[in-house]
Amino acid sequence: MEQRQVTEYFSRIGLSQPSDTTIESLKAIHQHQHRTIPFENFDVVQGLPIQLSQEALHEKLVVNQRGGYCQELNGLLLNMLTHMGFEARALLGRVHLAGEPTGRSHRVTLVTIDDKQWLVDAGFGTFTPRAPLLIETNIEQSNDLQTFRFIEDERYGFLLQIKQGEEWMNVYSLDMTYVGANDLESSNFFTSNSPKSIFTSNCIAALPIEGGIVTLLNQKIKISKDGSTEEWLLEDEPTYLTALQTYFGLAPNVPFQTLEKCF
C-alpha cells in the first residue's frame, strides 16, 4: 500500500494515523471508519460488479467518497489494519436475522491482540457493532447504544446476539475456519448477483450518528436518535438525491429510474 493511500484513508475517516497496534488504536480506527463511510448498495442495484482489490476499494470508498456493503467496508478496513501491522484476517459469517441462517455470506474481520481475539465489523447496517467485540462467550458487552453477547452453538460456532429490550436476538454466527480470496469472491458474487440476496432488489443505506443511526430502505428514511424515531418517504428524485447527500454524504452515479425499481 502506498503512503498516499494511507494518508487519504485517514483523511477520509477524520483520524490522525495511530502509531501502534493496541486495542485503543483498533477501536479508534473502527469507530471513525464506521461513522464516516456509509453502508450502501447502489452499485449492486445497478448490476455493477463489486470489485474487492485493494486499489478498487480505495478508489471507490476513499477517493470517490462512496460507501459499500460488508465485503467492501470490511475489506477496506482489513487492508489498512494489516498494513499497520495488526494481526488480522477475514472471516465469513452466517446471518440469522430471518430465522433460518444464510450461507457464509457476511464478511467480518478477526483481530488478535495480546492473545485475545476481537470481532471487528464495519459493515452490517443497522446492527453493526459500534465497537470491536471480544470473542468470548456468555459475557455482555455494551457500547454507547448496544449490548451484545456471544453464545456457543454446536452447529454454527460463535453466535452473536443483540439485546432488544429484555430479549436476545440472533444476529450472525461465525467460526474460525480459514477464509481465502476465492471464498470472499464467491460470497461477494452471490450477494451482489443472486435474486435471493436482499441487496439485489432493495436500495439500502445506513450511517451511525451520535446517539443513533440514519437508515434508508428503498423510499423510507428513518432517523433513530436518543430513543426516538422519525421516518418519512422520499417521494421524488430531487428529495431522494438530496437526502442521500445530506444524511449519508453520497452522490452515487445511478439513474433515479434504476432506484425506482426498488420502490
Image (spheres, rainbow, N blue to C red):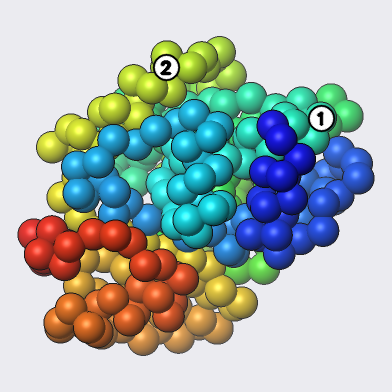
Q: Are marks 1 and 2 in contact (CB under 8 Å)?
A: no
Number of the front mark, 1 or 2:
1
Q: Which residue is mark 2?
A: 183
Q: Position of residue 227 (x, y in %)?
A: 50, 82
Q: Is residue 125 left or right of residue 138?
A: left
Q: Is residue 37 left or right of residue 236?
A: right
Please tell me which residue lies in front, 43 or 247. 43
Marks 1 and 2, the one that precedes in the sequence: 1
Q: Relative to 211, say whether 50 is above or below.
A: above
Q: Is residue 195 visible?
A: yes
Label placed on residue 54: none
Q: Which residue is mark 1?
A: 85
Q: Position of residue 2 (x, y in %)?
A: 71, 35
Q: Relative to 213, say whether 226 is above or below.
A: below
Q: Is residue 150 visible?
A: no
Which of the image's four quarters has the N terminus?
Answer: top right
Say which residue appears at 26% left-offset and 28% top-offset: 190
Residue furthest to the right = 19
